[in-house]
Amino acid sequence: MPTYTGISSEAFRHPLDQQAEQALRNLPGFDLIARKFVEFVYERPQLVYLMGNTIQVGPRQYSTIYQMFRECVRDLDIYPEPTLFVSQNPQANSYALGQENPYIVINTGILDLLNEAEIRAVLAHELGHIKCGHTILIQMAMWAMSAASALGELTFGIGNFVSQGLIYAFFEWRRKAELTADRAALLVVDDLNTVLSSMMKISGGSSKYANECSLQEFIKQSENYHALDDDGLNQVYKFLMYNGAQGTMLTHPFPVERVQYLKQWAVSPEYQQIRQGNYQRSPASGSVDVKAATTEAEAERLRRQIEELQQEINKMKKSE
């Protein structure tokens, strides 16, 4: 497996991830959310919970998984080493959180469904979030949405600032951040089919009928999904589904959509240059700044999208 010594997260970060984060940081209320988050949210209770309710992976606990994990940490040049936990949960899922003490939780559903190469891809994906400093923003988003919805105006002083637009912006960024993490998985595993196979299995794979699943058919499905955009109305439906028209806003792009993004990057000169060792280097990895960025153009683009979304939702409500 390739090792990318000294690699900067900017070397592989997806431009849509960068743009969405810049737009998010420029929206009114973001700075206040950042300050209040640091003031009220602490990582220690989360770590205490995981220590009490999951298995911490180490040299003598899930030793095979730990060895793969350490290799992924090395390959993405992440220091210090995050903590890895295995949670007893049949849902094929995993996540990364934490700033001062970043950690990854991987469900037993993942371990039971995927082979070792695919598990490595999942670990590298989550480590990509840590490498890029995504975890602090993910936690901020979760906290802001929870505080705004559960406490109304009594939201630690943020009730008047957690606008619908800011919540939309958090979700927009979270979806785009997944595209960057997918790139991290490809860099570490160095095999496109393995990463795509992990996406397919997490989407609807079965251990019992694994021999009846075809990666090529899944890729063809992603191409058919992409072709739906030829009808403008389908684009509207996709936009609405992502942004809560069916009741819940989505934190991840549809897997078939991620397939297309990653396939394009896998044949790009940028990816080939990184594999050859020609990439941006940085001594600091996995850090995130909570200062506001100034990108008016991107912020205005996002505001227009939010307004269009609200108009479409209002139309749907009137037609019911």
Image: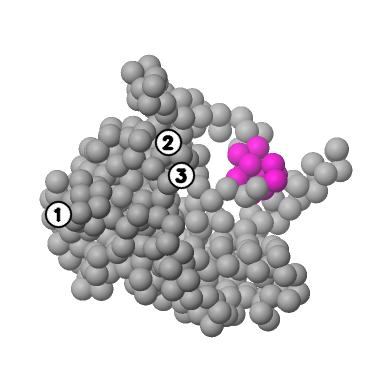
In primary-sequence order, the first of circles 1 and 2 is: 1
- Give the residue type at disc 2: Ile
Foreground: 89 or 257?
Answer: 89
Under circle 3, the secondary element is: loop
Name the mark nearer the viewer: 1 or 3. Answer: 3
Q: Residue 250, position in %: x, y?
A: 58, 48
State the residue lying farthest toward the top.
212
> Is residue 240 shown in magenta?
yes
Quadrant of the rendered image containing residue 245: top right
For label 1, the crowd category at 10 Å Cα-Cα, with few meaning under 14, some 14 to 19 and many 20 or more, is some
Foreground: 186 or 15?
Answer: 186
- Give the residue type at disc 3: Asn
Per the rendering, the mark at residue 202 is 2
Quadrant of the rendered image containing residue 161: bottom right
CA distance for labels 1 and 3: 31 Å
**Residue identified by numbered label 3:** 89
Q: Quadrant of the C terminus?
A: top right
Under circle 2, the secondary element is: helix
Side of 156 relative to 106 (left or right): right
CA distance for labels 3 and 2: 14 Å
Name the mark nearer the viewer: 3 or 2. Answer: 3
Q: Residue at x 25, y 48 (%)?
A: 62
Quadrant of the rendered image containing residue 59: bottom left
**Residue identified by numbered label 1:** 3
Q: Does the residue at mark 1 contact the one at mark 3 (Cβ under 8 Å)?
A: no
Q: Residue 31, position in %: x, y?
A: 56, 79
Which range of residues does the magenta coloring cover?
237-247
Q: Residue 104, position in %: x, y?
A: 36, 57
